[in-house]
Image: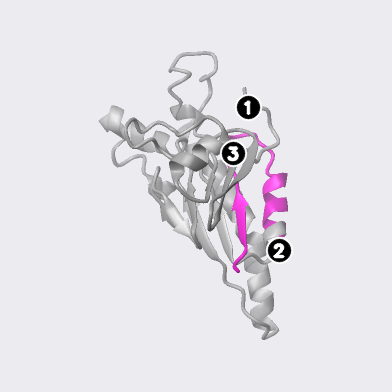
Amino acid sequence: MRRHLIVPDTQLKPGDSLLHIRWAGEAIADYLPDVIVVMGDWWDMPSLSMHEGPGSKEAEGRNVMSDIAIGNEAFELLIQAMRKEQGRRRSRKRMQWNPECHFLFGNHEHRITRAIYNDPKWDGVLTLDALKTPGFQRHPYQKIVTIDGIRYCHFFPNPSTGKAINGTIVNRLNHIGGSFVQGHQQGFLYASKQYPDHVKHGLVCGRFYQHHEH
């Protein structure tokens, strides 16, 4: 049985403390999971928010390159302890530890794609390649990734509307069709459902930050 470690949404923006990211990296090196999944919305990208338009008080002083830089800095911090532990094991000729690492793009990273689509002047200037996730396999926004029988997605889209399947956790278990983990929604939800020959589990974990989100 492989162990999975999940890092929920961080929604990092310039000025945020990164202390909890360091803690997460040290936890990874301590727990030695077999699989690491970063659930998306690692970057907040407030400069590209459609909720607060250009010229608004909230948007004043925002800069897209600063939005990108804070997430890149934090990701390097996340993997720092992991790299150190891997190097220590190599130097001491101990059993190697190379976890399977996945990054799921969320709707906040998708703000870059949407900005390019809505305003072609960003084409060639903004790109998802600017978001650095070294050593992690990257999965497109809204793509469902199955790992050891568990379905992962930033959120699970309704096939008819593309909007998130929501409601109670049991409702999601019924509609998603198998054990799942998602981010996106602030807070924590968990439930299991017993079937004649198996049990399905559902987990919603969409918040890993110290700051207050309005």
Q: Residue at x 65, y 38 (%)?
A: 188
Residue 167 appears in the figure? yes
How many C-alpha atoms fall within 10 Å of the one at disc 1: few (<14), some, or many (≥20)?
A: few
How many numbered callouts? 3
Q: Which residue of the protein is positioned furthest toward the top in this rendering?
A: 56
Residue 140 magenta-highlighted: no
Which picture quadrant has residue 203? top right
SS for tag 2?
Answer: helix
Q: Which residue is mark 1?
A: 213
State which quarter of the image contains the N terminus: bottom right
Q: Residue at x 72, y 45 (%)?
A: 19
Q: Which residues are magenta?
A: 1-26
Q: What's the distance in space between the residues labelled 3 and 1, CA to CA?
A: 12 Å
Q: Between tags 2 and 1, which lies in front?
A: 2
Residue 132 appears in the figure? no
Q: Residue at x 51, y 35 (%)?
A: 171
Q: What's the distance in space between the residues labelled 2 and 1, CA to CA?
A: 29 Å
SS for tag 3?
Answer: loop
Q: Residue 44: x percent and y percent? A: 53, 35
Q: Earlier in the sequence, mark 3 or mark 2?
A: 2
How many C-alpha atoms fall within 10 Å of the one at disc 3: few (<14), some, or many (≥20)?
A: many
Q: Which residue is mark 2?
A: 31
Q: Earlier in the sequence, mark 2 or mark 1?
A: 2
SS for tag 1?
Answer: loop
Which picture quadrant has residue 175? top left
Residue 2, placed above or below residue 8: below
Q: What's the distance in space between the residues labelled 3 and 2, CA to CA?
A: 21 Å
Q: Which mark is residue 206?
A: 3
Q: Amino acid at mark 2?
A: Tyr
Q: Amino acid at mark 1?
A: Glu
- Asked whether 153 or 90 is in front, the reply is 153
